[in-house]
Amino acid sequence: MAEPALSSTESTSRLAWVTGASRGIGYAVARALAADGWVVAVSARNAADLETLARECGELKGEVRPYPLDITDAFAVSRTFAAIEADLGNVGLAILNAGTHEPVDGRSFAIAPFRRLMEVNYMGAVNCLAPVVEHFVARGTGRIAVVASLAGYRGLPTASAYGASKAALINMCEALHPELDAVGVILSVVTPGFVRTQLTDKNSFPMPFLINADTAARRIVRGLKDDRFEITFPRRFAFLMKLFRVLPYRIFFAFTRRIRPMLPKIGGGTPTSRSNLS
Ligand SMILES: NC(=O)c1ccc[n+]([C@@H]2O[C@H](COP(=O)([O-])OP(=O)(O)OC[C@H]3O[C@@H](n4cnc5c(N)ncnc54)[C@H](OP(=O)(O)O)[C@@H]3O)[C@@H](O)[C@H]2O)c1
């Protein structure tokens, strides 16, 4: 049986823009789209890795075209988006996937990682949304997927900076969805669990329900084939995280206190007990 079309934008454009495509999930998504016949403009800072991806996709049905970019530079993002459309035509699908992670220990609190992660994960996506939304709204069509994380659903140990940036993305997408939907632009938020990439190589604790980047890419591309707002996987981990969202803090913290001993020790001192706070 033939695969269903990639949502309502398929009839208007088979040109996709994928950010964070030099490795990991973005790389696998770009390959999967090119295998499906899409022309894929790919962005990340590392131009050489993007060229490698383009070469590796040379035999596929579609085509990959590199557009190196640092998404924290809003002017460069606008210029790059304009260059993609001038070279290749109207973008129909934007997958805003670029992001990074820095585990932090709240006991040695520092401002810098919070600023860095908001700048890349949140403001980077906002910088990309600016030209995408402007053009898609003007045309009354287009499909956007913003890659957040299940870590944005609830605050988890060592992920206070990362989780906050992803929670901000989820909230922003929830707010934007009906507004864009009213003018024919479909917005989805992607919330993966643990995926084995360079990003999760920084985690030295056991990662439940870990999947590889090709599986994640398949789930994303499959999720884009219908017009669902939320594309989340793996299903069992997503269910658990959603359950955590509705649990009272007393039960939720009983769980996060239990996983704390599995986490790496960063810095000295022992965690503050509840008794010495009173
Ligand atoms: N892996 C997971 O378990 C997991 C789970 C949930 C959500 N996610 C999210 O999925 C996305 C991809 O993660 P991943 O695991 O594939 O990570 P990854 O392997 O570290 O890849 C991150 C990608 O983002 C690009 N990037 C980082 N900073 C950038 C910047 N300032 N400008 C442009 N590109 C930038 C990187 O390329 P350059 O370094 O070349 O710029 C790279 O292509 C991220 O948003 C991440 O938060 C990952």
Image (spheres, grey):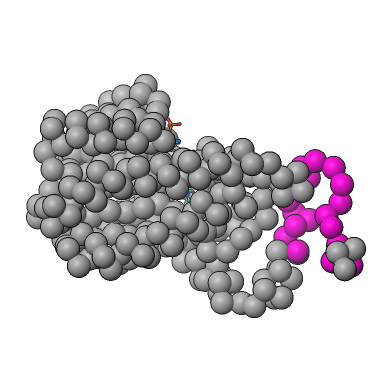
In the rendering, at what x and y percent does residue 123 appear?
42, 44
Residue 226 in the figure: left or right of residue 149: left
* Magenta stretch: helix, strand or loop mostly: loop
Residue beneath the point at 37% across and 65% down: 174
Q: How many marks?
A: 0
In the rendering, at what x and y percent does residue 239 appear?
51, 71
Part of the protein shown in magenta: 257-275
Q: Classify 140 as above or below 254.
A: above
Residue beneath the point at 17% across and 47% down: 135
Toward the right, the furthest residue is 276
Residue 234 visible in rendering: yes
Closer-to-camera residue (197/170): 170
Residue 25 in the figure: left or right of residue 196: left
Residue 223 visible in rendering: no
| Rendering quadrant holding ligand 1 | top left
Residue 252 in the figure: left or right of residue 70: right
Of the 4 image quadrants, the one containing the C terminus is bottom right
Residue beneath the point at 75% across and 43% down: 108
